[in-house]
C-alpha cells in the first residue's frame, strides 16, 4: 500500500522534475545555435528571456556540456589586462548571483579570490599594469609583495628554493570558482522552460547559404530552415565556420587539467603562476583542481600526456611544497580555440545571418552567460551592443588586435 | 595482535620479523609481509575510515588498493592505500576523515541526515536567500576532503626511472607470466610490472587443485621462478601501471617496501608492444547497507586467510555470482572458519566440482539467491538472503563477515585509457574491451577468459603477438597456440546479475561518494540519463577508487532503470592515472638547470648578485657598489659588463645574404667587412622581435648577434626560412662558444689599448667598426665598437675558454682608470638614458618598427626578397590607432612611476610606462611609455597612475604622477660620446 | 610524452622534442598583396579536422625543419614529406 503510494509519487514526479526535454526536430526555426556548450545555451536562454525569441534550437553533437564547458577548471575573475575586455568580464562576474537566483539553481559560486604570482621584477611590472588598469576601471585588485602573498596563502614557498622564486602577486578578491556543470544544466533548464529546443546527439554537418545569406542547417537528423545561425561550437568553431567558407584566426590546441584526491581544505584561493604555467584551487569537495598550459600544436584529440602530469607536479610543488602529499587522480583534455590576441571573436561575419561566439580559448567559461546575453541582443535586434564591439572579426584585417597579451604567441612560426 | 592461522605454503608473512608501528599514537605489532591494512586487521581494527559524505564507517573491502575504504595517513602522507602499502618498521599511521576515532566519529551523525540530502542536493539548496550560501559553503567546506596535507611530510625519498623495452607486460599473473616467457623467447627486452609484492596473481593464494593438475600456487611459483630466471625479463614488483599513453608509453608507480630507500618511484616505460594482463576485479553486489564493515570482496577474505594467515571473521556468509566465491568458501571452511551459507546469484553455470566440495563440507548452498539486506551499525550483524528474481523466501543469517560480489569485471581501465572501446558481452555478462590500438594486446581475465589452460594459452599468444609486432613473429607458433585455444572447451557462462529489485535506501552504488541506487534513479528522472551525465550529477565514480567498483554497475543500473537491454548504456570514460599518483613521486628528485657564462665564477668573486633571465644566470648588480655608482663609473671612467649571453652566429654559404635580407628589415647587401650594421628583425605582422648587429667576415660569410633571450628562436627562425626556400646557408651557433664583454666609458679606449697592439684611435677604429685583434699578444678577439649604453664602448668577443682571463686582464689594465664591473640594473639605466629600447620590455606584440621610431631600420626599396613583415610594415605605417613609444621626464624630478604604471587621460587607460628610472646622470626621473597616438605629442603632459593598495572599503589608494614628453635620447642626443 | 613524430634525421621521437611550425601555406607576393589578404595570410588557419600538412622543427634535437602530413584527429603522421636535412 505504502509502496504503491510512493511509486505513484515517484512516477508523478518523473515528469515534473526533468531538467530538459526531448522534442522532435522542427523543419524550421527562427534561429539555430550550433553547440550545446555554455555560450550556445546562454545565448539561447537570453534570446528567450530577453527577446521572446523561443523558436530556437540548440544543436549539440554529443550531450550538453560535452566540450570545454564540462571540462574547464571553473575559474572566474574580471581582472583582464585590457580596458576593452574588462567591462564584459566585470559584468559577467557580477551576473553570477543574479543568475543563481533567477535560474533557481545553486551554481556554487565560491568567492575565494585569485592570486596570480609574479616571479621577477619584470613579471611584477606586467601584473602591476593589470592591477592599475583594474583599479582605474573600478575592479578590485591589488599587488601584494611576497610576504603578503604568504600571509594570504600560507603554503606558498617564498624562499629562494623554487626555480622561480615568488616575487609578489596580483590579488583579485572578487574572483573564485563556479561549478561549471551546474551552469550548463541550469541554463539548459532555463532555456527548456522557455520553450527552446535542445537537440542532443545531433550533429550539424553543413550550413546552407544562398546569396551570401544563411538559409538553413543540415544535420544528421535532418535539415532545418533558418535565417540565423550562431557558431558556438567551441573547439570545433573553425570546422563549423568552414561550412560557410570562413577561415578563423584560431588555432585549436589541446589543454589538459587534473584533479587530486580529496584533501581536507587548506587552499582557500585560486593560485596561479604564468611563469610556471600552472594554477590550482581546491574544490568544495576537497580536490585540488589544476591546469594551465596548452600543448602547442593543433589537435582535435583530447589525449592526455604523461609529460603534462609530471610538469604540473613539479610546478605545483615548487609553488607549494606541501602539495607533494597530494595525489593526482584524474587528468583529462579539452580543446581550446585560441586567437592570436587571446581575446574572443564575438562578431557578425561576411555571411548574412551567420554570427560567431568563439575564440574563447581557455578563458571562456567565466564570461559565457554575459556574452550570451549580449549576443542574444545582437541577434534579436541586429545591432551590435557597444560592449561587444572590440571583439569583431574585422580587427585582424585592420591590424588592430586586442591587448590581452603582450607576448608574441608561440604556436606558429610567425613568432 | 591476534594469533595467525597455522603456517601454509601460500602465506607471505614472516613470523620471525615483527614490525612495530603506531596507529592513532599507540604502538602495534605486525609482521613483515603485512600491508598496513592486514596488520591493523590482525590487531582487531575493523573500522578504518569514514565515508566522504555521510561519514559511514568503512572496513576492509579489497586488498589491492582499489577501494577508498582503507585510506590512511602514513608519516604525514595523506590518502595512502593501507591495503596495498607494505608495512614498514616505525610507521606512524593515522585514520582520516574522522572527528574522534573511526569507531566514534562525531561526524557519523551525518548519515542520519542523509534523507535530507537527495541527489543533486547541493544544487537545490542554500542559494535562497543568497546570504545563506557563504555560511553553508563554509560548513560544507569544513566537512570536505579525506586526508590532511602535512607540510612536514619528508622530501627526497621519491625518484623517477625511465625504461625502454620491446615488450612491456602489465600484470604478473598466469597470463602475464606466460606472455613474458613467450616474449622472452624472442630475445628482446621484456619488462613485467606487477602491482602486488609477488608474482602469481590469483593463482598464488589458491590451493584447490584443478582436476588432476598441481595446486595453483605451485604452478604460480614455478612460473615465477622461470620468469625470474630469464635474463632479458625485468620484473618490477609493487608497481602499479597508471596509464598507457599514445605510442605505447606506459607509466607506473612503484611503492617502496621495507628495505627500499625510496618510498615511491614514478616510472615511464617506452615499449614497442604492450600486453595487458591485469585480470579482473569483483563487482560489488547492490543491496541495502552493502557498505557495512564486515562486508568484503570474496578474494579479500580469501587472501586475508591464505596470504596473511588472518581469519576474516568467525561466522561468514557468502553471496557471489562467480566460481571463485565457491572455491573460497570451501577453502576457508578448510581453515576453520564457519561458513553459514553460500548464496549464488546464478541458477546454473557453476563448476559442479566446487559445489560437491561445499556439500561434502556440509555448507548450505543456495543457488539463485543473493544478499538483499544487511544489518548492523558499526559492524555487520546479519544478512538477509533472498531469491535473485521474484519474491521468494527470504532468510536472515547472523554473521560477522559477508563476502559479497556480483561476479567479476575485467580490470580493463588501462586498455580503455589506451583507447580500447568497451562493448557489452552478454555471454560473459561483462563489458569487455575491444578495438585495441596497434601494439597493444590483452590476455587472461581482462578478456573474461576462464580456466587456467585458456588463460595460459592466451598469455602465450599475447607474448607471441607482441613479438610479431616487432617483426619477430613465428606464424607457426601462433597458429599452434590458437589451435590449443580453440580446443579448450569453453565453459558455459552462467546468467549474470544485472540489477536486483532493490527496495530500500542505503544501497550504495558508489562507496566513495555515498551514492545510492535511489539517487541514481532520481537523477535519471531529472534527465541525467547518460552515464557521463549521471556521473557528473551524482559524482558516482569520481572519488579515489575511481570507477573500479562502480564502473560496471552504473551503466547496468542505468539500462535497467530505463528499460533497456544491458549494454545499451556504456560505461563512462576512464581517465588516467588509473592508480592515483603522488606529486612527490611524479616530481622525483628535484633538478633544476640554468646556464652560466664563462665569466660566472669571476663575476661572483667581484660580488655579483645573479638572477635568472631566460635560461641564463646573469649579474644583476655588484654587492659593494650602489646602482648609481655603477652608472656613474661608466659615464665618468670605465666599466664592463658580461654580455656572453648575447646570441652569436656565423652564417655562410651561397645564399647567406639572401637569408639575412629575408629576416632583417634592413638591406644586408650593404654590410661590408670591418663595419657593423644595426639590424632589426620583424615577424610577418611587422612587429619587432629582435635586433642586433651584422658584419661581413668574408665572401658570403657573416657574423651577427641577437639579444640574449632570442638566440634559440633566431636559430629556428633562420633555419625555417632557409629550409622553406631550400637555400644554401649554414648557420653556426657560437653563443656558447664565445664569451663577450662590453667595455664602456670614456676611458675604455685607453684600457683596450693596453691589451692590444692595434691602433684603437677613432680614425682607425671608428664607431660601428669591427676589428680582429690579438689580446695580450695571444688571444684572438673580435672587437666591435657599439654603444648600447651610450658611451664610447667596445664589445670584446673571445673564445669561451678565455672569458675568465679576459676579465682578469681588463681589471688589471683598467685599474689606473678606476674600472669596475656593472650589472643588468645599471645597464638598464644607462641604455634608458640613451633612449635605447629593450625589445619585449619597451615593445610588445603590437609594436611595429614605426611605432617605436625605428622605421629607418626598414629598407622599403630592398629588392624583391620577400622580407619578413614588409607588407605589414607597409600597411601599418600610416594607421591612426597605433600606440607610439615616447620618452618622458618627470615633472617632479625625483618621483619615478614604477614599471607597470599606466598612462591615463580622462579616466581611461591610454597606454603604459614600459621603463622608468631615476637617472643619476641627469639628476631626474626619465622613462619610456607606449601611448595612444593622440597623446604622443612632443611637449605634451602625461598622467601616470601607479597601482595602489586597497583600503578598508576595498577602494584603491590612487597614486598619480605627471610627466612631459621630451625628445629621446635623454643623454648625449648628438651621440658625441658614442662616436668620440 | 605522448605521440611520436618521425624526424627525417633522427627517427621517431617524443613529440615534446619538437616545435610545431604552422600549417604549410603559400606566402602571397609582397609587392601585389592587399592589406586584407596579407592579414588573412598572417592570422587565419585552416584548422583541418583530418589530415593537414604542417611544418615541424626538431627543437630539442638536431634542429631540422620538415613538413609532414598529420591527422589532427589522432595525431598520427600520414606520409613523410621530405627526407633531407
Ligand atoms: C581544460 C580546460 C580548462 C579550462 N579552464 C577554464 C577556466 O578555469 N576558466 C574559464 O573561464 N575558462 C576555462 N576554460 C575555457 C572554457 O571551458 C571554454 O572557453 C568554454 O567552455 C567555451 O564554451 P563554448 O560554449 O564556447 O564551447 P564548448 O563548451 O566547447 O561547447 C561547444 C559544443 O559544440 C558542440 N559541437 C561542436 N561541433 C558541433 C557540430 N558540428 N554540431 C553540433 N554540435 C557541435 C560540441 O560537442 C560542444 O559541446 C577551460 C578549457 C579547458 C579545455
Ligand atoms: Zn632530428
Image (tube, coloured by chain):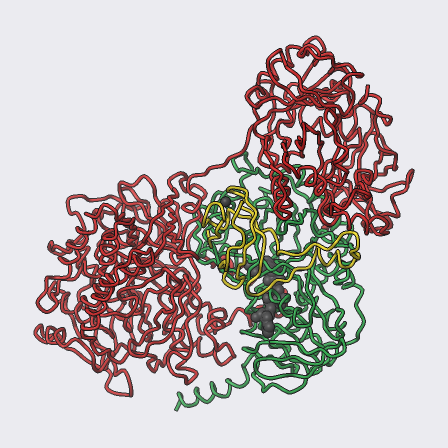
Chain colours: A green, B red, C yellow
On the picture, is A336 further left or further right than B298? right
> Relative to residue B212, is residue A174 depicted above or below?
above
Instruction: Indicate the position of residue B213 as horizontal and vertical percent values.
Output: 10, 64
Q: Nearer the viewer, residue C62 or B557?
A: C62
On the picture, is A309 further left or further right than A399? left
Please indicate, yes or no, whether residue B833 appears anywhere in the rendered image.
yes
Furthest toward the top, the residue is: B816
Q: Nearer the viewer, residue B437 or B540?
A: B437
Q: Count up the numbered dots.
A: 0
Furthest toward the right, the residue is: B939
On the picture, is A109 further left or further right than B682? left
Instruction: Indicate the position of residue B243 as horizontal and vertical percent values.
Output: 40, 56
Please indicate, yes or no, whether residue B134 appears anywhere in the rendered image.
no
Instruction: Indicate the position of residue C39 as horizontal and vertical percent values.
Output: 74, 56
Residue at 69% across, 23% down: B795
In which quarter of the view is residue A163 placed? top right
On the picture, is C69 further left or further right than A346? left
Residue at 52% across, 64% down: C73
> Relative to residue B108, is residue B752 depicted above or below?
above
In which quarter of the view is residue B201 placed? bottom left
In which quarter of the view is residue B387 placed? bottom left
> Relative to residue A142, is residue B838 depicted above or below?
above
Q: Nearer the viewer, residue A407 or C84?
A: C84
Instruction: Indicate the position of residue B119 as horizontal and vertical percent values.
Output: 48, 73
Q: Nearer the viewer, residue B959 or B189?
A: B189
Q: Quadrant of the C terminus of chain B?
A: top right
Amino acid at each position: 500500500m505504502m509502496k504503491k503510494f510512493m511509486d505513484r509519487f515517484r512516477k508523478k514526479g518523473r515528469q515534473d522534475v526533468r531538467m530538459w526535454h526531448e522534442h522532435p526536430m522542427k523543419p524550421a526555426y527562427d534561429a539555430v545555435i550550433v553547440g550545446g556548450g555554455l555560450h550556445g545555451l546562454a545565448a539561447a536562454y537570453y534570446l528567450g528571456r530577453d527577446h521572446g525569441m523561443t523558436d530556437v534550437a540548440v544543436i549539440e553533437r554529443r550531450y550538453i556540456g560535452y566540450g570545454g564547458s564540462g571540462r574547464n577548471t571553473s575559474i572566474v575573475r574580471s581582472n583582464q589586462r585590457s580596458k576593452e575586455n574588462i567591462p564584459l568580464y566585470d559584468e559577467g562576474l557580477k551576473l553570477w548571483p543574479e543568475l543563481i537566483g533567477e535560474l533557481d539553481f545553486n551554481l556554487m559560486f565560491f568567492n575565494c579570490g585569485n592570486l596570480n604570482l609574479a616571479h621577477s621584477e619584470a613579471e611584477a611590472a606586467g601584473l602591476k599594469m593589470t592591477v592599475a588598469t583594474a583599479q582605474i576601471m573600478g575592479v578590485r585588485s591589488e599587488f601584494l609583495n611576497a610576504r603578503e602573498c604568504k600571509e594570504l596563502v600560507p603554503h606558498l614557498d617564498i624562499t629562494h628554493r623554487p626555480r622561480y622564486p615568488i616575487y609578489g602577486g596580483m590579488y583579485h578578491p572578487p574572483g573564485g570558482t563556479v561549478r561549471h556543470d551546474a551552469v550548463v544544466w541550469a541554463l539548459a533548464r532555463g532555456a527548456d522552460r522557455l520553450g527552446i529546443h535542445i537537440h542532443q546527439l545531433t550533429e550539424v554537418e553543413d550550413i546552407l547559404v544562398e546569396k551570401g545569406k544563411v538559409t538553413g542547417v543540415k544535420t544528421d537528423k535532418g535539415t532545418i530552415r533558418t535565417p540565423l545561425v550562431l557558431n558556438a561550437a567551441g573547439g570545433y568553431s573553425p570546422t563549423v565556420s568552414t561550412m560557410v567558407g570562413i577561415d578563423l584566426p584560431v588555432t585549436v590546441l589541446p589543454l589538459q587539467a587534473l584533479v587530486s584526491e580529496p584533501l581536507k581544505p587548506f587552499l582557500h584561493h585560486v593560485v596561479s603562476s604564468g611563469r610556471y604555467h600552472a594554477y590550482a584551487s581546491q574544490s568544495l569537495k576537497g580536490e585540488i583542481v589544476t591546469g594551465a598550459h596548452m600543448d602547442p600544436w593543433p589537435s582535435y584529440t583530447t589525449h592526455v600526456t604523461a609529460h603534462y602530469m609530471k610538469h604540473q607536479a613539479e610546478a605545483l610543488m615548487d609553488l607549494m611544497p606541501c602539495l607533494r602529499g597530494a595525489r593526482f587522480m584524474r587528468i583529462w583534455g579539452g580543446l581550446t580555440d585560441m586567437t592570436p590576441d587571446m581575446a574572443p571573436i564575438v562578431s557578425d561575419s561576411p555571411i548574412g545571418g551567420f554570427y560567431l561566439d568563439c575564440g574563447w580559448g581557455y578563458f571562456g567559461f567565466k564570461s559565457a552567460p554575459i556574452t550570451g546575453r549580449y549576443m542574444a541582443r545582437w541577434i534579436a535586434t541586429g545591432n551590435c551592443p557597444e560592449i561587444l564591439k572590440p571583439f569583431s572579426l574585422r580587427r585582424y584585417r585592420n591590424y588592430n588586435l586586442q591587448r590581452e597579451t603582450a607576448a608574441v604567441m608561440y604556436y606558429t612560426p610567425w613568432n | 595482535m591476534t594469533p595467525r592461522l597455522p603456517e601454509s605454503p601460500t602465506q607471505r608473512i614472516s613470523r620471525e620479523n615483527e614490525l612495530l608501528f603506531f596507529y592513532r599514537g599507540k604502538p602495534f605489532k605486525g609482521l613483515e609481509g603485512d600491508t598496513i591494512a592486514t596488520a591493523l586487521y590482525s590487531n582487531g581494527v575493523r573500522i578504518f575510515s569514514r565515508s566522504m559524505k555521510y561519514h559511514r564507517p568503512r572496513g576492509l573491502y579489497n586488498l589491492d588498493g582499489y577501494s577508498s575504504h582503507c585510506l590512511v595517513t602514513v608519516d604525514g602522507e595523506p590518502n595512502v592505500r593501507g591495503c596495498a602499502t607494505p608495512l614498514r618498521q616505525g610507521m606512524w599511521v593515522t585514520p582520516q576523515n574522522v572527528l574522534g576515532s573511526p569507531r566514534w566519529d562525531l561526524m557519523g551523525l551525518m548519515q542520519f541526515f542523509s534523507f535530507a540530502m537527495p541527489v543533486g542536493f547541493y544544487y537545490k539548496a542554500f542559494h535562497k536567500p543568497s546570504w545563506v550560501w557563504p555560511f553553508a559553503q563554509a560548513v560544507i567546506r569544513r566537512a570536505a576532503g579525506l586526508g590532511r596535507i602535512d607540510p612536514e611530510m619528508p622530501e627526497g625519498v621519491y625518484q623517477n626511472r625511465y625504461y625502454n623495452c620491446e615488450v612491456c607486460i602489465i600484470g604478473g599473473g598466469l597470463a602475464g607470466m606466460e606472455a613474458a616467457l613467450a616474449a622472452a623467447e624472442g630475445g628482446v627486452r621484456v619488462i613485467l610490472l606487477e602491482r602486488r609484492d609477488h608474482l602469481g596473481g590469483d593463482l598464488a593464494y589458491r590451493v584447490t587443485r584443478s582436476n588432476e593438475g598441481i595446486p595453483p600456487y605451485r604452478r604460480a611459483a614455478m612460473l615465477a621462478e622461470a620468469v625470474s630466471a630469464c635474463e632479458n625479463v625485468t620484473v618490477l614488483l609493487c608497481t602499479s601501471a597508471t596509464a598507457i599513453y599514445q605510442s605505447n608509453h606506459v607509466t607506473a608507480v612503484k611503492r617502496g617496501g621495507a628495505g627500499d630507500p625510496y618510498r615511491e618511484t614514478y616510472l615511464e616505460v617506452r615499449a614497442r608492444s604492450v600486453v595487458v594482463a591485469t585480470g579482473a576485479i569483483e563487482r560489488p553486489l547492490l543491496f541495502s547497507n552493502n557498505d557495512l564493515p564486515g562486508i568484503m570482496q570474496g578474494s579479500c577474505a580469501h587472501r586475508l586467510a591464505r596470504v596473511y594467515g588472518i581469519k576474516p571473521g568467525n561466522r561468514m556468509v557468502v553471496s557471489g555470482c562467480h566460481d571463485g566465491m565457491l572455491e573460497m568458501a570451501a577453502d576457508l571452511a578448510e581453515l576453520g572458519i564457519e561458513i553459514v551459507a553460500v548464496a549464488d546469484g546464478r541458477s546454473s553455470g557453476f563448476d559442479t566440482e566446487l559445489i560437491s566440495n561445499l556439500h561434502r563440507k556440509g555448507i548450505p548452498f543456495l543457488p539463485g539467491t543473493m544478499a538483499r539486506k544487511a544489518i548492523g551499525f558499526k559492524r555487520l550483524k546479519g544478512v538477509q538472503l533472498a531469491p535473485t528474481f521474484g519474491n521468494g523466501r527470504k532468510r536472515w543469517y547472523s554473521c560477522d563477515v559477508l563476502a559479497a560480489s556480483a561476479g567479476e569485471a575485467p580490470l580493463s581501465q588501462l586498455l580503455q585509457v589506451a583507447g580500447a572501446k568497451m562493448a557489452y558481452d552478454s555471454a560473459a555478462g561483462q563489458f569487455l574491451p575491444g578495438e585495441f590500438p596497434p601494439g597493444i594486446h590483452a590476455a587472461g581475465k581482462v578478456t573474461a577468459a576462464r580456466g587456467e589452460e585458456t588463460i595460459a594459452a592466451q598469455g602465450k599468444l599475447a607474448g607471441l603477438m607482441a613479438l610479431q609486432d616487432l617483426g619477430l613473429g613465428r606464424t607457426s607458433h601462433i597458429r599452434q597456440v590458437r589451435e590449443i585455444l580453440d580446443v579448450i572447451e569453453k565453459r558455459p557462462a552462467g546468467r549474470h546479475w544485472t540489477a536486483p529489485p532493490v527496495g530500500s535506501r542505503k544501497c550504495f552504488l558508489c562507496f566513495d561518494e555515498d551514492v545510492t541506487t535511489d539517487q541514481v534513479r532520481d537523477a535519471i528522472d531529472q534527465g541525467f540519463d547518460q552515464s557521463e551525465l549521471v556521473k557528473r550529477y551524482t559524482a558516482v565514480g569520481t572519488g579515489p577508487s575511481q570507477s573500479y567498483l562502480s564502473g560496471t554497475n552504473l551503466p547496468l543500473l542505468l539500462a535497467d532503470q530505463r528499460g533497456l537491454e544491458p549494454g545499451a548504456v556504456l560505461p563512462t570514460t576512464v581517465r588516467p592515472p588509473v592508480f592515483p599518483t603522488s606529486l612527490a613521486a611524479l616530481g622525483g628528485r628535484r633538478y633544476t638547470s640554468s646556464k652560466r657564462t664563462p665569466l660566472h665564477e669571476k663575476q661572483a668573486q667581484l660580488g655579483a648578485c645573479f638572477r635568472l633571465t631566460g635560461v641564463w644566470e646573469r649579474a644583476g648588480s655588484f654587492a659593494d657598489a650602489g646602482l648609481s655608482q655603477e652608472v656613474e663609473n661608466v659615464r665618468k671612467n670605465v666599466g664592463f659588463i658580461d654580455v656572453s649571453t648575447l646570441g652569436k652566429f656565423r652564417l655562410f654559404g651561397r645564399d647567406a645574404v639572401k637569408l639575412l635580407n629575408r629576416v632583417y628589415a634592413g638591406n644586408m647587401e650593404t654590410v661590408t667587412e670591418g663595419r657593423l650594421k644595426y639590424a632589426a628583425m620583424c615577424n610577418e605582422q611587422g612587429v619587432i622581435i629582435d635586433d642586433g648587429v651584422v658584419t661581413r667576415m668574408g665572401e658570403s660569410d657573416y657574423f651577427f648577434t641577437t639579444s640574449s633571450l632570442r638566440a634559440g628562436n633566431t636559430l629556428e627562425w633562420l633555419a625555417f626560412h632557409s629550409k622553406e626556400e631550400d637555400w644554401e646557408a649554414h648557420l653556426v651557433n657560437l653563443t656558447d662558444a664565445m664569451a663577450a664583454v662590453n667595455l664602456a666609458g670614456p676611458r675604455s679606449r685607453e684600457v683596450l689599448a693596453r691589451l692590444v697592439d692595434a691602433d684603437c684611435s677613432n680614425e682607425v677604429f671608428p664607431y660601428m667598426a669591427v676589428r680582429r685583434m690579438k689580446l695580450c699578444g695571444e688571444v684572438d678577439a673580435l672587437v666591435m665598437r657599439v654603444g648600447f649604453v651610450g658611451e664610447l664602448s667596445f664589445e670584446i668577443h673571445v673564445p669561451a675558454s678565455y672569458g675568465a682571463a679576459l676579465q682578469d686582464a681588463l681589471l688589471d689594465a683598467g685599474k689606473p682608470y678606476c674600472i669596475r664591473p656593472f650589472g643588468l640594473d645599471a645597464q638598464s639605466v644607462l641604455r634608458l638614458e640613451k633612449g635605447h629600447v629593450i625589445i619585449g620590455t619597451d615593445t610588445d606584440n603590437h609594436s611595429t618598427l614605426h611605432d617605436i621610431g625605428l622605421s629607418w631600420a626598414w629598407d622599403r626599396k630592398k629588392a624583391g626578397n620577400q622580407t619578413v613583415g614588409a607588407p605589414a610594415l607597409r600597411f601599418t605605417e600610416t594607421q591612426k590607432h597605433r600606440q607610439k613609444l615616447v620618452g618622458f621626464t618627470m615633472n617632479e624630478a625625483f618621483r619615478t612611476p614604477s614599471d607597470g604604471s599606466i598612462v591615463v587621460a580622462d579616466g581611461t587607460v591610454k597606454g603604459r610606462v614600459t621603463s622608468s628610472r631615476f637617472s643619476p646622470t641627469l639628476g631626474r626621473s626619465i622613462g619610456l611609455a607606449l601611448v595612444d597616438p593622440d597623446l604622443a605629442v612632443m611637449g605634451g603632459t602625461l598622467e601616470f597612475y601607479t597601482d595602489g593598495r586597497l583600503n578598508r572599503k576595498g577602494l584603491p589608494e590612487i597614486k598619480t604622477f605627471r610627466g612631459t614628453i621630451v625628445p629621446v635620447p635623454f643623454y648625449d642626443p648628438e651621440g658625441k660620446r658614442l662616436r668620440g | 610524452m605522448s605521440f611520436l613524430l618521425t624526424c627525417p634525421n633522427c627517427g621517431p621521437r617524443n613529440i615534446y622534442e619538437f616545435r610545431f611550425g604552422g600549417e604549410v601555406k603559400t606566402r602571397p607576393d609582397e609587392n601585389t598583396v592587399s592589406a586584407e589578404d596579407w592579414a588573412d595570410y598572417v592570422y587565419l588557419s585552416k584548422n583541418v579536422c583530418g589530415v593537414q600538412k604542417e611544418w615541424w622543427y626538431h627543437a630539442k634535437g638536431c634542429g631540422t625543419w620538415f613538413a609532414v602530413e598529420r591527422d589532427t584527429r589522432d595525431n598520427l603522421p600520414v606520409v613523410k614529406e621530405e627526407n633531407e636535412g
